[in-house]
Structure formats: structure tokens, C-alpha cells
Amino acid sequence: MSPDTFDAIIIGAGQAGPSLAGRLNDAGMKVAIIERHLVGGTCVNTGCKPTKTLVASAYAAHTARRGSEYGFTIGGPIEIDMRAVAARARKIILDSRAGNESWLAGMSNVELIRGHARFIASHTIAVGERELTAPLIFVNVGGRANIPNAPGVGEVPLLTNTDIVALEKLPRHLVVVGGSYIGLEFAQMYRRFGSEVTIVERSDRLIAREDPDVSDEIRAILEREGVTIRLGADCIGFERRGDEIAVSVNCESNNAPVIGSHVLMAVGRRPNTDDLGLDKAGIDTDGQGYITVDDRLQTNIPGVYALGDCNGRGAFTHTAYNDFEIVAANLLDGEDRTVDQRIVGYALYIDPPLARVGMTDAAAEKSGRRLLFSKRPMSRVGRAVEKGESQGFMKIVADADTRQILGAAILGTGGDEAIHGVLDMMHAGQTIDTFRWALPIHPTVSELLPTLLLDLKNRGS
Ligand SMILES: Cc1cc2nc3c(=O)[nH]c(=O)nc-3n(C[C@H](O)[C@H](O)[C@H](O)COP(=O)(O)OP(=O)(O)OC[C@H]3O[C@@H](n4cnc5c(N)ncnc54)[C@H](O)[C@@H]3O)c2cc1C
Ligand SMILES: NC(=O)c1ccc[n+]([C@@H]2O[C@H](COP(=O)([O-])OP(=O)(O)OC[C@H]3O[C@@H](n4cnc5c(N)ncnc54)[C@H](O)[C@@H]3O)[C@@H](O)[C@H]2O)c1
């Protein structure tokens, strides 16, 4: 049987694949896009979309409970209907997935093939009985929750993001293993829905890739809402206790386990590359299974590219999408775009959100530059005070010699939007002296960014 020939094959219909299919289709190329599970991938079905939808429900409930602070009362306690909450998320998922599917169906040169794809040679893919070949192959297979090999794994039910976004029952006590993006978003959300929540984190602080002041403030925000935090959990293990699960935190016998009704595992992701036949194609990976790519996202095999979470160069929807933009610009528009040109920002959607761009203070200090710092509490941001949401702070670190912004964090209301002012200035290569003269709108969180720049000082001064 000779393989079906295409101009391009895309494996995975997540955050890069469908957009790339669209561009290749418009260029008149014959394209196969292969999806083994749900069109839209993680973000649409079990990641960003359902999570942010659930965060919105939790925020509404939290604000309703704070009614008296705003001058209104609600006739009775706030009751959460988890079936209705889950149904709202499900609708947004299904609408988005259907939108993606009809978009792909409308591409006349693109065939969507359902099934698990694996390489059988460097430019040949098998899907079930069918074989396909193309000079260009784009791997966009994403990742899944990593479940570590700890005592009790396989013996007790453990939830991942896939299960928890569809939960229709309120846990009595949710134990969240991992205090980073996934763990923190679900921890606060479920506390607001009414569960008892404990975060169990191995490191000695939450979201340890951020600066310590960010970790400390996030901890304080969560503790104010009644989330229990157990840090330094270096000996995770699970055991059934009747209907509940005992999660051991430390191995010392005097350290009591946490007893929960449900356990969410949020200890990182692993790439979906172990069942892809990469060895048959001779495609290199790193020690953790991420596909090795150059700055133009090409693997060691010419014509084979890896985009999105599976290349280890980003772990966000916007980095996956930007991978598509880079590859499309280089192949179709005659541009020369590279991954190292991008300045990455991201947001952690607790409330208030943490928005970040560029370097942390710690990374800036390590770089050996002469630095300027500025920090302002959200209690001195009028818009935050007026909204009754004044927890957190905003801060910027800049290079004292080049006068360029190196990084910023806004842990505060509206921070996920306001950070783009900094991100855009950094992208445009502008200095603090240009940004300082931008005329912002009052009252906004962004209006304090120029003021923050005026306050930049050496750490000692
Ligand atoms: C709970 C959660 C919340 C998140 N929230 C955010 C957020 O707010 N903002 C943000 O930027 N990012 C967020 N992310 C991360 C974001 O979802 C991912 O970075 C993004 O989905 C990566 O896109 P991708 O295209 O690389 O992979 P995916 O979206 O995972 O898509 C990969 C696709 O490939 C398919 N596939 C895999 N192997 C094969 C195969 N062999 N054959 C055929 N098909 C295959 C999969 O079924 C899947 O559909 C979140 C993630 C999680 C888990
Ligand atoms: N808002 C967003 O953009 C968003 C939201 C959710 C997820 N995501 C993406 O999903 C990815 C995965 O998120 P994540 O939070 O699962 O992973 P992560 O890699 O960001 O953090 C994992 C956390 O688990 C801890 N940990 C690891 N092993 C442990 C153990 N045995 N016991 C206790 N703690 C342990 C780590 O110290 C770390 O704090 C992120 O890289 C992120 O890009 C993004």
C-alpha cells in the first residue's frame, strides 16, 4: 500500500495546528490534520476555557458574599449549584469546539483525520490502517498532566485538570497537590464554591518561579479566604481512609497527613511524545520527552517542525499560537521570525490575577546589570480602591544604563489587561523615558504605570 500524499501533515488540532491549517489551505496546499481526541486540544476542552469560565463563577459568588461591603444584601446564604456551574463551562467548551470544527470543515484543501498519529518514517505517518506522507510535517501534540510515581498512586482516585473541569459535585475537602498555575486557580475557585481546600506544595513557597514577594502576597490572599497551605511537602503519598484520602506531606511521623474527599494533581505537565514513534523518524527529544527544535521551530529532521507545548519552548496558548505565527511567517511570507525574538508575558488567574512580563527581579539581579526598581501597593491605585479590590501590588525592574524595562509584575485587579502596556513598550524596544510620557486614562490600573516609572530607584536608595 503506498501512502496518501499531502503537501503538509499536521498532528494535533490544538492551539497551533488549526490556524496553520488555515494558512496552508489559503496558500493552496493539500493538508491533512490529524486529531486523536477533541478538536481544540487542552485549552478549549480541559484548560484555559473551562478554567476561566469556572473562575468567573467563583468570582461572582465571592463578590455576592461581599455584598454588605458594597451596600447590598442578598436574602439568604449564597448557594452554589455545581451542576449549573459545570453546565456553564460545558456550554462554553462545546461552542468553542464546534466553532473550531466548522472552521476546519470550511477549509477546502484540508482533510481532518480522526485517530492517533505516529511516525513510521521521517516523513511518513500512520493513522490506524492508513499511511500518509508529506514533505512538511508539523507536530502539535501538546501535553497532559504528569502523575508522579508516589506511594498510593493507582490505588486512590486522583483528579487531573481533565476531571475537575467537569466535576458536578462540591468536594467536602479538596486537597490540591502543587501550588503553581493549575493548583492555585482551582484552589481559590473551589474555596469560593464552598469546599475546604488545602494546597500541598513541595517547594518552600507557592509559585516558586516568581519573586518571593509575589509568592508571599499570593499566600496571604489565599489564606485570607481560608485556604490552608502546606509548604515543604517533600514526601507525597496517598492512602485510602474509608471514603476519604489521606495525603502524606512529610515523612516525619509527627507530621499529620491531610485528609481530603478529593485530590487534584497539579504538579506539572508532560509532553504527548512517548507514543508518537519519534524514534522511527529519528527526531531528537530532550531528557523529558520535549521535541528539540531550533529557533525557527524545526526539529533535527528537515521539514519536520514541532509547535506548542510539546517543544518545551512555551507552555501557554499564546506561545503555541505564536509558534504557528513564526512558522507561517517564515514558510509563507518570506519573513525570518525566531522564538528568541519574543518577549513572553503570562497571567495566573487567581483573583486578583498575577500578570507578568519579562524578567523577575531575581533574574534581573542575576544578569549582573545595574538596576532600578519600583513597587506600588494596589491600595495606592485609585481604580482598585474604588472597586474594593486593593490586594496586591505592581512593580517594575529596569536597566539603569539602557533605561529599558526588563520585567514587570502586576498582582492586582485588572493586571492581566494592564500588563500589556508594559509588554507592548518592551516589544517596541522603548525606554522608560518614552513610556513615562504616555498619557493614560483615569481611572485605570494602567494610569499608575508612568508613576511607577517615575519612582524607579536603585535598591539601596
Ligand atoms: C487547567 C489548565 C489551564 C490552563 N490555562 C491557561 C491559560 O489561562 N492561559 C494559557 O495561555 N494557557 C493555559 N493553559 C495551557 C494551555 O492549555 C496550553 O499551553 C495549550 O493548550 C497548548 O497548546 P498545544 O496546541 O501545544 O497543545 P494542546 O492544546 O494540548 O493540543 C494538542 C492536541 O494534539 C492531540 N494529539 C496528541 N497526540 C496526538 C497524536 N499522536 N495523534 C493525533 N493527535 C494527537 C491532542 O488530542 C490535542 O488535541 C492551561 C492548561 C491547563 C491544563
Ligand atoms: N493561567 C495560565 O496561563 C495557566 C493556567 C494553568 C496552567 N497553565 C500551564 O499549565 C502548565 C502546568 O501547570 P502546573 O501548575 O501543573 O505545573 P507547574 O510546573 O507550573 O507547577 C507544578 C508545581 O507542583 C509542585 N510539585 C511538583 N512535584 C510535587 C510533589 N511531588 N509534591 C508537591 N508538589 C509538587 C512544583 O513545586 C510546582 O510548584 C504550566 O506550565 C502553565 O504553562 C497555565
Image (cartoon, grey):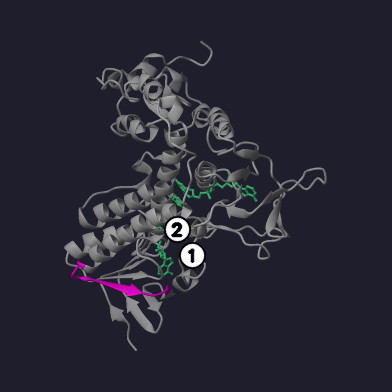
| Residue range of the region highlighted in magenta in the rendering | 106-118
Q: Which residue is mark 2?
A: 310
Mark 2 vs 1, N-terminal side:
1
> Label 1 belongs to which residue?
273
Which secondary structure, mark 1? loop
Report whether 190 appears left or right of 344.
Answer: right
Residue drawn at (20%, 68%) of the image = 29
Residue found at x 44% / y 22%:
378
Residue extending furthest toward the front? 75
Q: Residue 267, position in %: x, y?
A: 58, 51
- Density class for disc 2 (Cα within 10 Å; few <14, some 14-19, many ≥20) is many
Where in the figure is residue 270, as x and y percent of width and height?
52, 58
Q: Secondary structure at mark 2?
A: helix
Residue labelled 2 has its Cβ within 8 Å of some atom of ligand 1: yes
208 versus 271 height, above or below: above
On residue 442, which mark appears?
none
Inspect the image, locate mark 2, and give the three-letter code of the amino acid beneath it. Answer: Cys
Residue 432: percent from the left, percent from the top? 33, 21
